[in-house]
Amino acid sequence: MNPQAKLVFTISLLLGTTITVSSNHWVLAWTGLEINTLAILPLISKSHHPRAIEAATKYFLVQAAASTLVLFSSMTNAWHTGQWDITQLTNPTSSLILTTALAMKLGLVPFHFWFPEVLQGSSLPVGLLLSTAMKFPPITLLYMTSPSLNPTLLVTMALLSTALGGWMGLNQTQTRKILAFSSISHLGWMAIIISYNPKLTLLNFYLYALMTAAVFLTLNSTKTLNLPTLMTSWTKTPALNAMLMLTLLSLAGLPPLTGFLPKWLIIQELTKQEMAPAATIISLLSLLGLFFYLRLAYCATITLPPHTTNHMKQWHTNKPTSPMVAILTTMSLTLLPVSPLILPIV
């Protein structure tokens, strides 16, 4: 892709996100979401592979439908209350439609079907954008409207997302699809707490984006798209693969790694809200996710390829790893001890 074109699309992505995040008016927020969608489409389809074109088409159709619902929800609310302010979403019907629209944008169950397919059709850097940056504007809209949303509906969607994200990721062999189901599962953790403590949702999102970025960039530097390739990458970059294993365990939420912090705080908050059954269920469902993270970690570090296979061996490369991978990986592993410093900021 032409560097100037790539620069225009990147700036448009930043602009769309900034407009949505900083707006108080529904029409401005909707405009930001549309700019974001239009900016990411050429990046998804830039390889001109039929799979990439299919992914871009699916992404466009789903995001267009969700944006229409956002506009419809805000117009219904304005019709009943005369308010276009995002925080003044008082009409129950508007609230329900908005929850549906944002669930479609994020890929929450039962509107999750598009996300693994789109991620599978994209390259790893674009997959990283779809999993993190493109989720930020809808999450901020959820954050701003959280007092008006229906807690029962959100908890139900959250539990289903964690269950399906874990369950459907079990038999996948493509790393992008595994990370897509991982994203759906993490969104469940964010959605369950949004009505009770929205700041925890944002903290969870930031830490999830950090860990996912580390995993995507590591996979991108080793050019790993499926599990068989992951099994042979140990000979090429052993240190990077060892770090990938720890980052995956952090993403699974194992102590004493960073990923344990949001899960711990969310379970604590749910218990305070007298929702111990929901906390128990979501904790048990996260074990499904732990299984496929362990599978990825096992393939990355423990399984050496058998000598009878016909593929070419990959040996050490002299190509240096990006310093960004090192920074993100370090943060993905070591932020739990400094959590007392993080929590007052959030």
Image (spheres, rainbow, N blue to C red):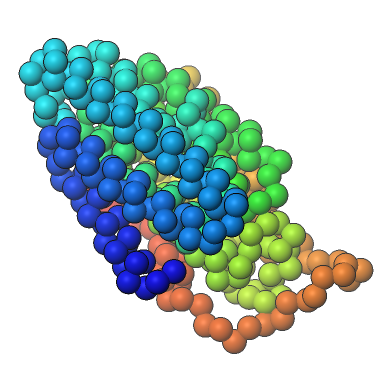
Compared to 153, does 181 lie above or below?
A: below
Residue beneath the point at 31% across and 38% down: 138
Compared to 254, does 314 lie above or below?
A: below
Q: Position of residue 345 (x, y in %)?
A: 21, 50
Residue beneath the point at 44% across and 49% down: 131
- Locate the N terminus and report the quarter of the image it occupies: bottom left
User: What is the residue that sits farthest to the right in this orientation?
Assistant: 308
Res 305 → quadrant: bottom right
Res 43 → quadrant: bottom left
Instruction: Tell me if 302 is positioned left or right of 139 in this view.
Output: right
Compared to 14, does 266 lie above or below?
A: above
Residue beneath the point at 31% across and 39% down: 139
Q: Position of residue 256 (x, y in %)?
A: 48, 53
Of residues 182 and 66, which is closer to you in this image? 66
User: What is the residue that sits farthest to the left in this orientation?
Assistant: 82
Of residues 2 and 182, which is closer to you in this image? 2
The answer to whether one can see residue 179 in this image is no
